[in-house]
Structure formats: C-alpha cells, structure tokens
Image (cartoon, rainbow, N blue to C red):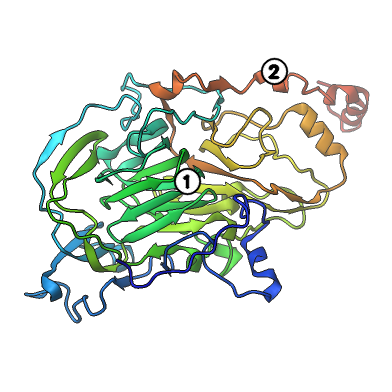
Amino acid sequence: MALANKKVEKLDRPDEYQKIFHWAETQQNGAVPSFATRKNDPYQYQAGFNNHFESEAVPGTIPRGQNSPRCVRFGLYAEQMTASAFVAPRHLNKNAWLYRSRPAVAHQGFTNLPDNSNTETNFLPINPRVHVSPTQLAWLPFDIAETKHDFVEGLCTIAGSGDPTLREGLATHVFTANVSMENKAFVNSDGDFLIVAQEGALDIQTEFGKLYVQPGEICVIQRGQRFKVNVEGPTRGYILEIWGANFELPELGAIGANGLANARDFLSPVAYYTVTKDDPWKIVYKLGGKFFESKQKHCPFDVVAWHGNYVPYKYDLTKFVNIGSISVDHIDPSIFCVLTARSRDPAAPLADFLIFSPRWDVASNTYRPPYYHRNVASELMGLIYGEYAGRSDEFQPGGVSFECGMVPHGVAYQEFKAASAQPPPEMRISEGAVAFMFESSRPFTITDWAIKSDKIHEHDPAMWDDLVDNFSQHKDEVDEILKKAGKLSL
C-alpha cells in the first residue's frame, strides 16, 4: 500500500509529451499550476538528487534517534543496504535502511541458471565472444519477438569495456519485453542500470516503491536493488550498466548554479509494500555476468518504510535545460551531459549519458552540422523518438549507432556543402525528437550477439567520396602567397 492515492489524468494523445519543445510548455504561461510528473503517471514521488530521503507507507514506522532498535514497530525487521566502503567520505557514503516484513536473507538458496548467449560481461579482447572493430557500425531497430518474454529474458548486450569483477567498466544493452515479470524479481549484483524507455511504458516495482517510466524518461536502478518490470504491451529500450561507480550530476563550472539536469527534477519513489504468505517468488541474480536464481516464499517488496540516500530514481528528459553557443562555433557535446560516472582517471569519466533534444541553434559565421572530428571517446547512440539530423544514414527509433575512439566521423559532403551555403543558423532543431549517447573514455568491444545480428549494417564510407579537394583549385593564389613570403611552392 502507499501513503495516498494519486488522481491520474489521462493523456490527450499518446505522443503529447513528444510534441513539446520543453517541459515548460506544460505550464501554459502560468494558466495552470505547475506539476512534477506526466499526466498518466499513477505514482507519487520525492524530488531531489542524492538527497537523504525517508518514506513511510505506515506513519510512525521509522525509529527515531537510531536505525536498529531491539524491537522495530509492528514487528518489522531492520535491514541495511550499504553501497560504499564503510570508511568512504561522507559525501560519497551511500546506504539505506529498510524496515520490512521479512529480511532478504529469508530465501531457499541459490541455483545456477543457464548462460545467456545474448548477454555479455567480460569485454577483454582475450574473450573470443567479443570483437574489436574500427568500423562505424549501426543496427536497425531490434524486433520485439512475439514469443512471450519479460524484461530479464529480453536482455541483449551490444558492447562494453572491462569486467565487473575488476570493479571498473561498463556494458551497453538493449531490451525487449511483451509480458510482465510475474512473481519474479531481478537484482544486478554487478553494477547500476541506467534504463532508457524507448517504446512502451515500464511500470517498475522496487523495494523502495514504484516508478512509472515512459519513452522520453530514464530511470536508474542501483546495484543490489531488487525490482520487477511490468509492461502494458510490446516494450523496448536501452541500458547503460556501470561497474565500480555510481551516476552523478556533472559539475557545472562556469555555467553556474543552474542548467543541464537540475537536481530537483529527479524523482525517487515513496514506500509501497506487498506482504504475502506462502507466495512463491523467484529472484534472479546477475553476478559476474552469470545468472543465478533464488526462491523464497514471500514477496520481496515488503518494505513498509525506509530512509537513506541509496535509492532508485527517474528523470524526464523534457526537463533538461540545454546550454549552447550564442556567438560562434559548436561547443563540445559535454554540454548535453545528463549524468556522469567517475573512473579512476580524474580527467576521464567512466561513462556519460548525453541527450540531443529540442533546442535553439543560434550562432554567427558557422554552420549547423558538427565539424569533422576524431576524439578519444567510444560513442554508442540511440534514438528514442523522432528524426535525428546528426546522422547521415538510416537512424531509426530503437536503432543503435557506434563509433570507437579516434575513428574520424562527420556528415556527408552534400550535407556539409548545403549547410555551408546557408545563412548562419538561427533555428529550432531536433523538434519532436530525442536522441542519446552512451559515451565512455574506455574502448569498447562488440559482442557476438551484436556482430551476428541481422540488424547490423555499416556506415557506408561512400558517403564521403564526394568530399572534394577545394584547396587545389587555389594553387595559383597559394603559389603567389608563398613566393611573396620567400617560400618554395609545394
């Protein structure tokens, strides 16, 4: 049960939030009250990022002045989830206290599950199931098979780096589902899941409460937190999994106090419990990339109250506050960073989650497309909805595009030429679209499943064949300049 029921207002149309330029439009210039969630979201939330929250489904449950008294009210058990070293600095220390009907230790042991050939965790090149490739790869949208399968059964890995047992690395996945998880929960003991909903809503029950995540929203389920995913039909999305770090808001630096993803727009659940007796449940554990199963005779979501800062959360991407150039040139894509995760290199993040959403593009003496570039980052892009003009080949919602570090990329010559001939940009771009990028300083290897997929295709290098050598047409002018400078012609 929850503290109170929320009145749910239905959507006027399914794509209502895809059509807005920014969340601010939902306020209608003050004609209606501001609201925190989308109309059809049935749940209540607590706002803030990395706050120390507390929530009680039954008021008066949480003990005061201590965490684990001899007797917890209503005969509940106190259970702590600690996600950082005990001696971690206070600002990095993450934990939560759960007050529940039965502790998680009440289970019937573990059994091995068969290896899933569609998932991968070891991305070291010595693993024969992963591949190094400098080729710019892409995948068409992955089909949602008609065969019944839930969120866990629909996990498939694209690429990654490292290994979770090394406590630094990451994996990128896609998922599909067409049925809900029934009496089944999942816990990732390897790392944190950043889940991007692309098609269909995810109704997620966690030990801390419920999250409703729709296309255009993301959620983060952190390491060790149990959850189950209910779906309302064919569902698809993306996952960025990180090991050895937690997601943070990027530093703002010269931007100042506000902008990008603001802390108050992140939402965490309120306590919601289900207590059952002799109710068989399966808990699927992912550990070191292997899958295990534990059975128990009670619902794992029996937490009546909790407090702490190690909690799941969600964020609506339409609330992102874009920052950009208003004079000349493109600014580096770090200005589109929603969440980041640290690596052991203080100058290079383990992972960034960036979005490319509706915004104004205004600048002088430049052009709209990105400049041709090479950079150290591995870049894996996806499209949630709409059309994205930053790709020169077929790029559809639910698809994937990948470029490894230091491989040159940029738009086709025709797009470059057309943009160079246009007046300086002053326009709204990416209207009705949200694309994202999983970016890392780590080199990625590609999984067998992704390499052998019938959805894979390469970025055709022929798209750059028309890049003409304009410089040679100015040979006489250049020779004259060199002659006056006392230099030999080349």
Quarter of the image for the N terminus: give it.
bottom left
* Residue 376 pos. (x, y %): 52, 37
Q: Which residue is pictured at 49% across the width and 44% down the height?
A: 200
Circle 1 residues within 10 Å: few <14, some 14–19, many ≥20? many
Residue at the spot 13% in from the left edge and 47% down from the top edge: 296
The image quadrant of residue 208 is bottom left
Residue 119 place in picture, x, y as percent: 34, 30
Camera-nearest residue between 220 and 114? 114
Counting residues from the start of the chain, the first of labels 2 and 1 encountered is 1
Which of discs 2 and 1 lies nearer the camera? The answer is 1
Front residue of 224/154: it is 154
Q: Quadrant of the C terminus?
A: top right
Q: Is residue 368 left or right of residue 396?
A: right
Taking 105 as reference, is 142 above or below it?
above
Callout 2: 10 Å neighbours few (<14), some, many (20+)? few
Does dot 1 land on a helix, a strand or a loop? Answer: strand
Can you see residue 136?
A: yes
Residue 250 showing in the rendered view: no
Residue occupying the point 25% across, 27% down? 115
Question: Which residue, given by chain and number where applicable, does mark 2 sit on?
Answer: 462
Residue 21 at x, y = what percent? 68, 56
Q: Is residue 455 left or right of residue 73?
A: right
Q: Nearer the viewer, residue 263 or 471?
A: 263
Which residue sits at x=28%, y=44%? 182
Say what amino acid the circle numbered 1 marks: Val
Between the C-alphas of marks 2 and 1, the distance is 32 Å
Q: Which residue is mark 1?
A: 196
Q: Tell me which amino acid carries mark 2.
A: Ala
- Coordinates of residue 45 in the picture (x, y in percent): 41, 67
Q: Is residue 418 left or right of residue 38?
A: right
Secondary structure beneath disc 2?
helix
